[in-house]
Every structure is written in structure tokens, then in C-alpha cells.
Image (cartoon, coloured by chain):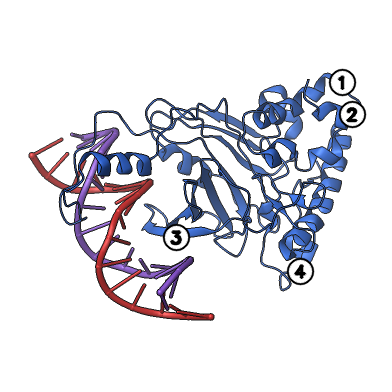
Chain colours: A blue, B purple, C red
DNA sequence: CGTGTTTGACCGGCGC
DNA sequence: GCGCCGGTCAAACACG
């Protein structure tokens, strides 16, 4: 079977010298596909390296991983920690000479009860003001409430640069060696005050050209890259940010947007997906993003449908 | 001086 | 209890 690609070959698309490999900024399927609705055998040509659901759990994040590969489909529900996540990712075979994009979607976001470590730390400060709490000293005992995480999602990107630009400003706060991997994992936190979004960046050791980026939490502010503007003026990425039209990153994203949109159209057509026919039951594929969008706070995110907003008829994307 | 990175130490969960 | 490991802290440092 002829193998088609959902993602754009970075080198082919833009030339490796013009831009760093930012193709991951487009995530055409981010939050878009409900794989439970899709006959995975029909997706055999896709090069989705992994789809991860980091939906929050009462205690530790539980990860359900779906791998969709040629002639291989698995659904894994790891036990109680995040180890299996990276393992699954790392088990993905390398696919040289092709870009790969994967995405994951978060389920219902129980964001009101989620409490970050920073929040807890602030509370600790309040409760124990006057106490010295330098790092060298023992930190105050935490309460028995266990740590809860924000919803997370991860994706894999073929890229030469580790830290992919996404329109937000990040401050690196740590780097750790990863077990069974020669590549370190970097930890970033959004620099905006009161925004506790974090992301981890690591390189797959099975395919060093693949960068695994994991986002945790949701931005409580617009992208600082954009001065302002509505969606119509700029190009919205899938993280709720909108980039101004003249922005270099925006232009780049728009270029890839067009490229990948065409790929998506071709792919859907070859699959027999009547993407312009709302009467098909296959349209259920597109419903999850809308559901997710309604769970996000930012207007930009609400309106952002990524590639689907151009491929899928607008009435399919409307709130019902 | 403000901002961001580096890096060793610390913390907490987990398995044995 | 101990060690491993992922995640975080924060002092030191670099840079514009």
C-alpha cells in the first residue's frame, strides 16, 4: 500500500536552512480526532506516532496511550504513573525522512479543583510565614492531599531544535537526565504571572530527530507574541494563541497550515471521508475538538479549529 | 539591572 | 527503610 503522510516533510516544505523545524506548531490533529470513532485499520497509512491522553486523575496522572501505526494499533492504559507514557513513545519505530505529528486530547477538564505545586507552595508560605524555608532546610511537610496535575497532552515532532516556538514565553527551570535515554529532559514554565502552564521537552532516544513535548495546564492569558487582534487578523495556533499576520512565526505557520490542510484534504478524500458532507456518520470524528473547545476558557481557543476550521464545513464546527 | 539558563541539591512517590 | 527516579527549587552565572 502506498504510504501517505499526514504531516509535511519539513525539509521539503521550507528548506532546512530557512527556518528551524517548527512544523509541530501546527498540530493539525490536536484535539481533533476521536479515534474511538475511527476504524483504525483505515488509518494504516498514517504516521501518527502516538496519541496520548493525559486526563487528570484524582491522584497521579493516568495515561491512556493510543498508537496508530501502519498495521499496528494498540491501546494502552498504564497503571498509575507516567512511566509507561515515555516507554510507549519510545517504542515507536523511527520513521526516517518523514515528519510525524501526534496529538492527544484531554477529556473533561476538572480545572477548578486542580491545585498546582506553586499554589501549594504559596499556601505553605502563608501558613508558615516567619519560618525560614530555604531549600537547604527541610521544607514544611505537605498536607496529606496528594498532588494533582493539570491536564496534559503530548505530541511528537520531528525537529532539529528541542525547544519549539509556540508563541509563548517560557522559562527553563530544570533539566534532568532521563533514564534509558542519552538525551536530557528540559522543564519549562510559562513566564507570565499567575500562569502555571508547564511543558517538558525531551528527545526520543529511539529516533533522535523526534522531539517529545508535553504541555501541562492551560494558559490564562493570550500569547505574548501577539499584541492583540482577533482570530481573523492573525493565525491561531492550537494553543489558543493568535499570531499577527506579519509575524514571522505566523507566516511560517500559515505556510504549513496550507500545506497540511492540503494533506488533510487529500487524506480524507482517499479515505472516503466526505469532509464536506455533513451527512456522513464519519463526521463524528470531528466532534471531540468542539467538545474540548467548549471546555477551554480562551476565546481564541474556542474559535480555533486548526486545520479543520478550513477543511470541515463551518456548520460542522458551530456550537449546537 | 532585568531576564533567562545552568546545575547540584532537595523533595516526594513508588517499588522492593 | 532504602534506593531509584521524576520533578522542582534556587543560587550562581551569563547575557543584552
Residue A15's tag is 4
> Circle 1: is it few (<14), some (14-19), or many (20+) Cα within 10 Å?
few
Residue linked to disc 3: A172
Percent of width and height locating residue A83: 40, 40
Residue A280 is labelled as 1
Looking at the rendered image, the disc whose residue lies closer to the viewer, 2 or 3, is: 3
Q: Which chain carries label 4?
A: A
Q: Is residue A207 above or below residue A279?
A: below
From the top left corner, tell me how far across and down residue A298 is, in percent.
Answer: 64, 39
Q: Report which quarter residue A31 is drawn in.
A: top right
Is A185 in front, or is A118?
A118
Quarter assignment of residue A58: top left
Same chain check for tags 4 and 1:
yes
Question: Which percent across, then down, holds residue A239?
Answer: 64, 45
How far is mark 3 from mark 4, CA to CA? 29 Å
The answer to whether the residue labelled 2 contacts the one labelled 1, judged by CB atoms less than 8 Å apart, is: yes
In this view of the protein, can residue A272 be seen by the observer?
Answer: no
The residues tagged by marks 1 and 3 sit, at their Cα atoms, a distance apart of 46 Å
Q: Which chain carries label 3?
A: A
Instruction: Specify the quadrant that holds the C terminus of chain A.
Output: top right
Q: Quadrant of the N terminus of chain A?
A: top right
Give the CA separation, mark 4 to mark 1. 38 Å
Earlier in the chain: of badge 3 and badge 4, it is 4
Q: List x then y, in percent, for residue A129.
A: 21, 45
The numbered dot on residue A274 is: 2
**Dot 1 or dot 3, earlier in sequence:** 3
- Classify residue A39 as left or right of residue A199: right
Amino acid at each position: 500500500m502506498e504510504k501517505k503522510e499526514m504531516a509535511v516533510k519539513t525539509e521539503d516544505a521550507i528548506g532546512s536552512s530557512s527556518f528551524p523545524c517548527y512544523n509541530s506548531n501546527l498540530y493539525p490533529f490536536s484535539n481533533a480526532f476521536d479515534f474511538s470513532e475511527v476504524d483504525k485499520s483505515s488509518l494504516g497509512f498514517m504516521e501518527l506516532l502516538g496519541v496520548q491522553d493525559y486526563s487528570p486523575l484524582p491522584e497521579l496522572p493516568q495515561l491512556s496511550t493510543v498508537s496508530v501505526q501502519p498495521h499496528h494499533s494498540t491501546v494502552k492504559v498504564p497503571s498509575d504513573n507516567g512511566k509507561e507514557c515515555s516507554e510507549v513513545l519510545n517504542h515507536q519505530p523511527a520513521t526516517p525522512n518523514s515528519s510525524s505529528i501526534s496529538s492527544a486530547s484531554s477529556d473533561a477538564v476538572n480545572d477548578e479543583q486542580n491545585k498546582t505545586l506553586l499554589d501549594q507552595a504559596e499556601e505553605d508560605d502563608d501558613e508558615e510565614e516567619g519560618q525560614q524555608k530555604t531549600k537547604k532546610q527541610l521544607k514544611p511537610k505537605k498536607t496529606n492531599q496528594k498532588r494533582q496535575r493539570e491536564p496534559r497532552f503530548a505530541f511528537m515532532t520531528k525537529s532539529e531544535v528541542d525547544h519549539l516556538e509556540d508563541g509563548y514565553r517560557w522559562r527553563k527551570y530544570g533539566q534532568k537526565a532521563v533514564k534509558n535515554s542519552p538525551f536530557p529532559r528540559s522543564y519549562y514554565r510559562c513566564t507570565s504571572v499567575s500562569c502555571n502552564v508547564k511543558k517538558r521537552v525531551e528527545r526520543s532516544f529511539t529516533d533522535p530527530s523526534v522531539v517529545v513535548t508535553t504541555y501541562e495546564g492551560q494558559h490564562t492569558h493570550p500569547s505574548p507574541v501577539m499584541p492583540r487582534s482577533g482570530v481573523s487578523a492573525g493565525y491561531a495556533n492550537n494553543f489558543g494563541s493568535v499570531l499577527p499576520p506579519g509575524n514571522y512565526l505566523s507566516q511560517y505557520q500559515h505556510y504549513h497550515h496550507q500545506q497540511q490542510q492540503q494533506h488533510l484534504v487529500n487524506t480524507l478524500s482517499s479515505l472516503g471521508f466526505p469532509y464536506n458532507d455533513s451527512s456522513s456518520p464519519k463526521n463524528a470524528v470531528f466532534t471531540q475538538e468542539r467538545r474540548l473547545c467548549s471546555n477551554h476558557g480562551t476565546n481564541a481557543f474556542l474559535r480555533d479549529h486548526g486545520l479543520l476550521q478550513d477543511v470541515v464545513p463551518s456548520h460542522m464546527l458551530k456550537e449546537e
